[in-house]
């Protein structure tokens, strides 16, 4: 299993737009139901810091780059952000529950 964590902060006046773009990704994921992939997005209490975490099982490909909704989401991410996305690959799992 591979795991990736992405964190960024959007401009306050772009938070709703960003959330809508994220929701569109989830709608497309639900329509395609790619196997071996789990994904979640959270926003902190500040309303502008978003964190995405993706898990891809061995033998499967992460589908995000192929989704039209994800391409729209990433197309203008730099314009929406006060703090650009920082990607962390999580390499050694110490433990998990229901992941």
Image (cartoon, helix red, strand yellow):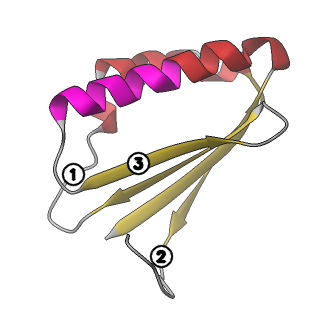
* Residue linked to disc 1: 61
**C-alpha gap between disc 1 and disc 3:** 13 Å
Magenta region, residue range: 21-32
Instruction: Report the residue at 48% width, 86% height from top.
Output: 95
Crowd class of label 2 (few under 14; some 14 to 19; many from 20; radius 10 Å) = few
Q: Is residue 54 visible?
A: yes
Instruction: Report the residue at 33% width, 24% height from top.
Output: 27
* Residue linked to disc 2: 91
Residue 91 shown in magenta: no
**C-alpha gap between disc 3 and disc 2:** 17 Å
Across and down, in percent, residue 58 comes to: 21, 69
Q: In this view, does 42 lie to the left or right of 94?
A: right
Mark 3 or mark 2, which has the lower sequence index? 3
Q: Can residue 74 be seen in this view?
A: no
* Residue linked to disc 3: 39
**C-alpha gap between disc 1 and disc 2:** 17 Å
Q: Is residue 71 left or right of residue 56?
A: right
């Amino acid at each position: 299993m591979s795991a990736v964590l992405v964190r960024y902060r959007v401009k306050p006046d772009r938070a709703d737009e960003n959330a809508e773009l994220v929701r569109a990704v989830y709608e497309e994921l639900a329509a395609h139901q790619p196997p071996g992939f789990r994904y979640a997005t959270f926003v902190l209490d500040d309303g502008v810091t978003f964190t995405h975490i993706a898990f891809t099982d061995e033998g499967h490909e992460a589908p995000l780059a192929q989704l039209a909704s994800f391409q729209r989401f990433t197309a203008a991410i730099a314009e929406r952000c006060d703090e650009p996305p920082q990607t962390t690959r999580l390499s050694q799992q110490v433990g998990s529950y229901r992941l």
